[in-house]
Amino acid sequence: MSTDTRDQTDTSGAVARLVHPRAIRWLHWINFPLLLVMIWSGMRIYWAEDVYAFGIGSWQWFAFFPDSIYETFELERRLAKGMAFHFAFGWLFVINGAIYSIYLAVTGEWRHIVPDRHAPREAKDVVLHDVHLREDAPPQGKYNAAQRLSYTIALAMALVLVVSGFAIYKPTQLHPLPLLFGGYQGARLVHFTMTIGLVLFFLVHVIQVVRAGWGNFRSMVTGYVIEDET
Amino acid sequence: MTADRAERERQLREQLEQAPTIPVDEFRTRSRRSFITGAIGVAGAIAGFRWLQNASTDDGIPFPLRDTLEFNEELWSTLSAGRSAPEHPVSKATPIQVNGRIGIRDEIDLATWTVRVLGPDGELLDELDISHFESLPQRDMVIEHKCIEGWSSIVHWGGTRFSDFHARYVDRIGDVAYVGLETPDGLYYVGWDMASILHPQTMLVLRQGDEPLDQAHGAPLRLATPNKYGIKCLKRIGVIRYSRERPADYWAERSYDWYAGL
């Protein structure tokens, strides 16, 4: 199969094939602003006790977050507003994610995303191909092996993010949930780490979407890619 | 190896070819429709968020967010009311930092301190000195105190359950849903619902570890619980007021959640 990413005008013999079902498109795009609001309000909460840093002992190589970030995004002294947004939009984020999970499970769509037994080796080949160290790309279905791995990791991080979030939100009422993360402060660290992980995923995701081109981006809006009828 | 690869390619292609196709002409129509829907969606989301941010405020936050906090309170107090936080061995206890000084900035003479207990119609039920609280059943509690800012520490508190203090007034106050507490100067004040304040882990604290409280931690009498943020744990209690209406709360008036339950 060859997908045509150019928006060609000569379309004789071409058809458009559905690659992203309507539900997935909606849930994907709804998730984006919800996650954005969650991260923004979450950083307003984090500001009030911003203790995490990379470093050894008292030497800090990078402290989350530099003042410039707090100032640019108006994150300072807004703990109460941060909490109000976080605990309102959190429900929408969780509901959207729950519908998505149920959809994947019921329709079998998860088979396109969850890595199969070839994935680890093929994912390595995809990366080598992407950085031009390998001529051919391994065979792929809807997603290549690197996509399968990274999408699955992103979904797993989102799940851990939500569960650790609830552990921080209601540590007494959901006890012993915080123990899963080594306690209340452990849950806080896991929640923060998963957020950073999702932000890194997002950055790579955007770069790859730009690289993949217009036809690929369009398919997440329209659902279809144009392919040659062979 | 190549045969394997061909077989794998065939399987993967088969997976994809289960999906329906449409003619390209139809695709063009659908594509336009999808992008228009997308544009409307983006505009709607931006407009909706702007509306929310500019909505009239209720105690400092947009009213839909205040309503959601109250919905959350309703939900969680129904879901699992009366659950208790874990308690820890005394060896885990650490000193607790001093965070809030509102209402306790100046030292007071502990010997002349009293707490006034008021009924729901403002009537004075009692004016008590510390000996009254020392005479109530004493208990120790080693719990994780959680600050709304994000830090927490395991503290060893000693004192009496609020419910043991409350027993003396049950017959005198009638059906009352709330308790408000204030510092002697009235500068800091918190509101509690009856179920939360009668929880067995809600304590009127006289001691930290085996020592009497110091003034920075709320001497001679403060509130403590592992089940609400520290903002609810009023230091240096001057007034305990039973109330039929939701009492004013210092931080709830400043954009925070009134319930602040954990």
Image (spheres, grey):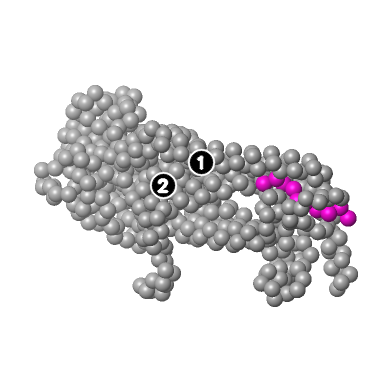
Mark linked to residue B46: 1
Q: Please report the residue visible at 68 percent of the width from the left and 69 percent of the height from the top.
A: A130
Task: Name the one closer to the observer, A218 or B4.
Answer: A218
In the image, residue A74 above or below residue A136: above
Quarter holding residue A230:
bottom right
| Residue A55 versus residue B215 in the image, above or below | below
Q: Residues within 10 Å of mark 2 (few under 14, many from 20)?
A: many
Snapshot quadrant of residue B208: bottom left
Distance between the alpha carbons at the discs numbered 1 and 2: 18 Å
Extent of the magenta region: A221-230
User: Residue, x 87% and y 64% (percent of image)?
Assistant: B7
Q: Position of residue A223 (x, y in %)?
A: 72, 46
Q: Which residue is mark 2?
A: A82
Chain letter behind tag 1: B
Q: Horizontally, is B132 left or right of A77 in the view? A: left
- In the displayed structure, would residue B134 be above or below residue A211? above
Quadrant, the C terminus of chain B = top left
Amino acid marked by disc 1 = Ile
